[in-house]
Amino acid sequence: LIIEEIQFHRIQKELNKPFVTSLQTVADRESIIVTVRSAGGLEGFGECVAFSTPWYSEETVESCRFVMEQVLKPLLVKKVLNAPGEVAELFAGVKGNNMAKAAIEMAVWDLFAKFEGVSLWQYIGGIQKQISAGVVVAADSRNLLNEIEQVAAKGYSRIKVKISSQTDAEALKRVVERYPEILFFADANGGFSEETFERLQTFDDVGFALIEQPFGERQWKLHARANREMKTPICLDESITGIHDVERMIEMQAGKIIVLKMGRLGGWNETLKIVELCRRHNVGMWVGGMMEFGVSKAHNLALASLPDIVLPGDFSDSRYFWKEDIILPEIEVINGKITLQDKAGIGYDVNIDEAGL
Ligand code: OSB
Ligand code: MG
C-alpha cells in the first residue's frame, strides 16, 4: 500500500457531565481524528487520545497536532508499506510522543484490514466477538449509590471506581458488598504516596479485583511494596509506556496486571508485542479507556477480542459520555456485552462534523 494522504480533524464535544478524577476534572473533550488514504480511495481512521492539558501524560492535543503534522506525516506520505508494522520503524527516530504516533499508526492498521477486506479484530487474530462492557464512576460522587444502581440496571457487570487518598474505604466496602454480582476495580491515578501508604492499605479489604496505579508513574519501588504487602492485585496504567516498562514491572514484581492503552503505548505494533510478553509471563491484561470517541473505542474493542484478554475493560456505550458519538452505528451495550462488527477494518463509519475541522 502507498499512503497517499493524511488528514487531521480536530473535534471537541462536551461530556454529558464533567468527569472528576484525583488529577483533573474533564468537562470538554478535544481530540484529533486521523484519516489516512491510499490509492483507490481506501480510508483508515485513528484517534489521538491526548488531553487538552498534560494531566494524564506529557502529551497534549496541541503537541500531538504539531508532531503529527510536522514530524510524522512527512515520514509516511508516499511511502510504500508491505505491512502496518512498518510504521513503527519509520517513526523509530522520533522520541516519545506515543499518542501522536499511535493515532496515525492505528489509522494505517485500519487501512490494511480494509485492504484485506477483513475486520480489524480478525486481522489481528482476535477470537472473542462479544466484549464485556465496563464503566467508570467517581468514588467521591455524592450519589455514588445512585450511579451504581443506574449502570447495574443497564447491564454493566464491571465498575471501575476512581479513588483518592481522601476516599472513605469503609463506605466503599458497604457499596461493593451490596453488589456481589458486580466486579469492582479501583483506579487511583497515582493519587497515593509514601506518606499515604497506610491509607492505601485500608482499601485492601474493600473487595476490589485490582487497584490501578496507586502511585506516580515512576514510583516502581512503592508499587513493588504495595504488590508485596497487599492482597489486592496491583495493576499499572500510567507507568507502562512501552514493552520495557512491562519487563521492569515483571522484574521488580511491581504489579500483576497492566492496562493496555494503545495511545500511551504508541500503537498496535508495540501493544501486540506487549500482549505476547504478558501472555508468556502470566501478567493479566485489560483494555483501558481514555474517555475517548468512537474511533479509538473501535480500535480498543478489536484489541479486546484477543484470546488472552479476559478481564473486562473500560467499555461503556457511546451515550455514557456523549450525547452523540462520531461513529455509526454507535456503541451499544446489551446484557453487559458489546458485539463486534463484521465489516472490514474498524467496522464503523466515521461521521466527523465538517464544522469541527
Ligand atoms: O486512568 O484509566 C484512566 C480516563 C481518562 C484518562 C485516564 C483514565 C480514564 C478512565 C476512563 O479511567 C475510563 C473510560 O474511558 O471508560
Ligand atoms: Mg487508569
Image: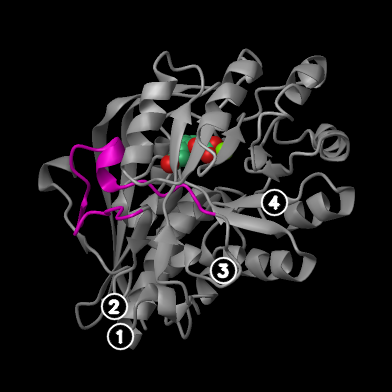
- In front here: 79 or 285? 285
Label located before the other in sequence (3 or 2): 3
The count of marks equals 4
User: Which three-letter amino acid code belongs to the residue tagged 4?
Assistant: Ile
Label located before the other in sequence (2 or 4): 4
Q: Quadrant of residue 117?
A: bottom left
**Which residue bears the numbered disc 4?**
257
Asked if the beta carbon under badge 2 is closer than 8 A to the nearest atom of ligand 1, the reply is: no
**Image position, residue 169 (x, y; %):** 64, 19
Q: Secondary structure at mark 3?
A: helix
Q: Which residues are magenta?
A: 312-335
User: Is the residue under label 4 in contact with that under label 2 (CB below 8 Å)?
Assistant: no
Against 296, residue 49 (above or below) is above
Q: Quadrant of residue 199?
A: top right
Marking on residue 344: 2
Q: Secondary structure at mark 2?
A: loop
**Magenta highlight: main SS:** loop
Mark 2 or mark 4, whichever is nearer to me? 4
Residue 74 visible to an observer of this rendering: no
Q: What is the CA distance from the residue labelled 3 to the residue labelled 2?
A: 19 Å
Q: Is residue 342 left or right of residue 103?
A: left
User: Which three-letter amino acid code belongs to the residue tagged 3?
Assistant: Asn
**Image position, residue 13 (x, y; %):** 24, 34
Residue visible at 80% across and 50% down? 249
Q: Residues within 10 Å of mark 2 (few under 14, many from 20)?
A: many
Q: What is the CA distance from the residue labelled 1 to the residue labelled 2?
A: 5 Å
Q: Residues within 10 Å of mark 4 (few under 14, many from 20)?
A: many
Q: What is the CA distance from the residue labelled 4 to the residue labelled 1?
A: 34 Å
Mark 3 or mark 1, whichever is nearer to me? 1
> Which image quarter holds the N terminus?
bottom left
